[in-house]
């Protein structure tokens, strides 16, 4: 960061709750602390935005930062009708315009405030594509840590500087919702810096500045020399922010994870962040426990098909706004099956195709677009007998239902055409090459191709293959070199936008996530999730994925 004497002092309003800091860290923290002020076109400065609230001639200015292409984070007090009053969720009371780092503008059309601190998320009227996003830190800054923040407010000498300024601050203390800071040298937070982003040495967002003494700011009495400030903590809001952002229309990965006898649902956003996981039975009704579950997406609806510990199959829907329908007993319409052990589901248009294993045999039903269920049918009657099935997976390829069933450690494939006709079971190993005994399987459809993942050798080896629309198969490709030496209990797969998303539950209760894009890059950048926020039960069991809009 810049030495204080080389940079204009800045501060935000203190008692009126419309103050925030200004200052950021460059991508190279060592240089940022001792070198010249970073230009405004460098990360993370390009994530910082200018806010104008009110009409021309009767407006006030604030600062903020992009959390993604559609959302900003700033101080709730910027939008308050009077200082100290709460800000309701919904459309801002006054016209609120965001100016991005590249000069583009967009309106704030919806607010989601926190009730425990001076912080709000604002959804933009137009997507801010092409600019970097502020990345929320995983931890609060330690006492004595240096922070920087950037804002568009006053300086010592300018009322409306028209450019981004930065300041350096020292962390004094923190509690659950706030950070207290002191400006280094003459650095301060001035009017217009309210909502400004506070960054740590790694360039990660730790807070949003809220109040300040404004010592040294233009228009403040010279007798005021204090540079202290209070910022709203952002580091402990990563999950909450992801949950808010998940309501934005657009592709996302839905996941359901069975743990113990509980079932949890969470969302993975395009930037890789996860929402918290919700206990599905707390939202859709207690069915007495869950053995395993499947998930399918239709537009922005998430359909969950769960196998209860009582052996019955249930269905529920999560809407895009986070509300759930109550679980319904599928057997009431489709028929009750005995000794059900596995369930898989995938959407084909407005329908949900559900395949289950009952008494070791494969059965199929359809949830129609009008919400009714077709009776369960024994797939053996159309595809040939297959018994002792231990794992099942489904995929949609251009409206066709692809099915993989595992029995005796071997994988078999069948297809249900859009006409409703089934092919006979075929030995996957005969087409792709042999493996050790298969213990788990997952599938995802991409256009007319089906991506198959096989877990073998008691979970220690993982393979990928593709069945093309022509019926040709690629050879199996082992994923160990990419994923590392993991032991897998279950695997989920889904087509999400132009990617095939995979998630593996490991024997030590972690989730390893990876993806393959449509260009053919094989499963790059695996990410290990040691903790699934909100998942209280253990051990982790089955996992299933689906894409929604």
Image: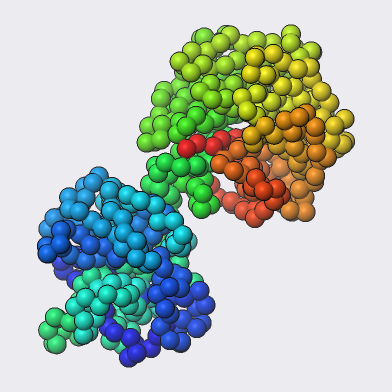
The answer, for residue 362, to whether it is visible in the render is: yes
Is residue 139 shown above or below 289? below
**Residue at image point 74% right, 8% down:** 381
Left or right of 144: which side holds 116? left
Q: How is the image coloured?
A: rainbow
**Residue at image point 26% right, 62% down:** 51
Q: Nearer the viewer, residue 513 or 291?
A: 513
Left or right of 310: which side holds 478? right
Is residue 206 shown above or below 261? below
Left or right of 350: which side holds 82? left
Kindly indicate the quadrant of the structure image that contains residue 191.
Answer: bottom left
**Residue at image point 45% right, 83% down:** 33
Residue 52's x, y, as percent?
23, 62
Left or right of 242: which side holds 254? right
Q: Nearer the viewer, residue 403 or 536?
A: 403
Kindly indicate the quadrant of the structure image that contains residue 448.
Answer: top right
Residue 359's x, y, as percent?
71, 15
Residue 40's x, y, as percent?
40, 75
Is residue 311 shown above or below 448? above
**Residue at image point 47% right, 75% down:** 26
Residue extending farthest bottom: 5
The answer, for residue 356, to whether it is visible in the render is: no
Is residue 15 shown above or below 252? below
């Amino acid at each position: 960061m810049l030495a204080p004497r080389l940079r204009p002092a800045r501060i935000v309003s203190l008692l009126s709750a419309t103050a925030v800091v200004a200052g950021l860290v460059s991508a190279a923290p060592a240089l940022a602390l001792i070198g010249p002020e970073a230009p405004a076109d460098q990360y993370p400065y390009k994530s910082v935005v200018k806010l104008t609230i009110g009409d021309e001639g009767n407006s006030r200015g604030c600062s903020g930062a992009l959390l993604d292409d559609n959302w900003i984070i700033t101080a709730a007090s910027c939008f308050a009708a009077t200082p100290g009053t709460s800000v309701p969720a919904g459309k801002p009371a006054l016209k609120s315009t965001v100016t991005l780092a590249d000069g583009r503008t967009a309106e704030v059309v919806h607010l989601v405030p926190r009730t425990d601190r001076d912080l709000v998320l604002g959804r933009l009227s137009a997507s801010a594509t092409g600019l970097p996003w502020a990345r929320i830190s995983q931890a609060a800054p330690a006492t004595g840590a240096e922070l920087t923040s950037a804002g568009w407010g006053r300086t010592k000498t300018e009322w409306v500087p028209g450019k981004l300024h930065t300041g350096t601050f020292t962390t004094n203390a923190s509690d659950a919702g706030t950070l207290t800071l002191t400006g280094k040298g003459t650095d301060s937070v001035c009017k217009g810096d309210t909502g400004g982003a506070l960054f740590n040495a790694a360039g990660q967002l730790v807070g949003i500045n809220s109040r300040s003494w404004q010592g040294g700011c233009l228009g403040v009495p010279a007798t005021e020399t204090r540079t202290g400030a209070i910022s709203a903590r952002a580091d402990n809001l990563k999950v909450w922010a992801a949950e808010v952002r998940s309501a934005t229309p657009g592709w996302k990965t839905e996941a359901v994870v069975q743990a113990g006898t509980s079932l949890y649902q969470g969302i993975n956003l395009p930037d890789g962040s996860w929402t918290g996981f919700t206990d599905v039975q707390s939202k859709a009704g207690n069915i007495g426990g869950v053995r395993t579950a499947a998930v399918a997406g239709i537009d922005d609806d998430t359909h969950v098909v769960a196998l209860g510990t009582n052996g019955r199959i249930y269905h529920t829907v999560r809407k895009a706004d986070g509300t759930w329908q109550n679980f319904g007993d599928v057997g009431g319409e489709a028929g009750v099956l005995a000794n059900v052990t596995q369930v898989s589901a995938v959407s084909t248009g407005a329908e949900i195709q559900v395949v289950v294993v009952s008494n070791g045999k494969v059965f199929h039903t359809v949830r129609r677009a009008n919400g009714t269920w077709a009776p369960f049918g024994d797939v053996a009657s159309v595809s040939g007998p297959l018994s002792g099935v231990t794992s099942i997976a489904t995929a949609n390829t251009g409206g066709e239902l692809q099915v993989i069933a595992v029995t005796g450690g071997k994988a078999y494939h069948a297809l249900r055409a859009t006409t409703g006709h089934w092919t006979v079971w075929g030995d996957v190993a005969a087409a792709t090459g042999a493996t050790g005994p298969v213990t788990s399987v997952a599938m995802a459809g991409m256009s007319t191709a089906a991506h198959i993942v096989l877990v073998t050798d008691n979970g220690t080896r993982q393979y990928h293959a593709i069945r093309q629309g022509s019926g040709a198969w690629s050879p199996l490709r082992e994923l160990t070199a990419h994923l590392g030496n993991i032991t897998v209990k279950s695997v989920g797969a889904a087509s999400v936008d132009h990617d095939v998303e995979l998630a593996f539950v490991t024997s030590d209760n972690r989730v390893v996530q990876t993806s393959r894009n449509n260009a053919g890059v094989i499963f790059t950048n695996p990410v290990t999730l040691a903790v699934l926020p909100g998942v209280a039960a253990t051990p982790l069991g089955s996992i299933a994925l689906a894409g929604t809009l």
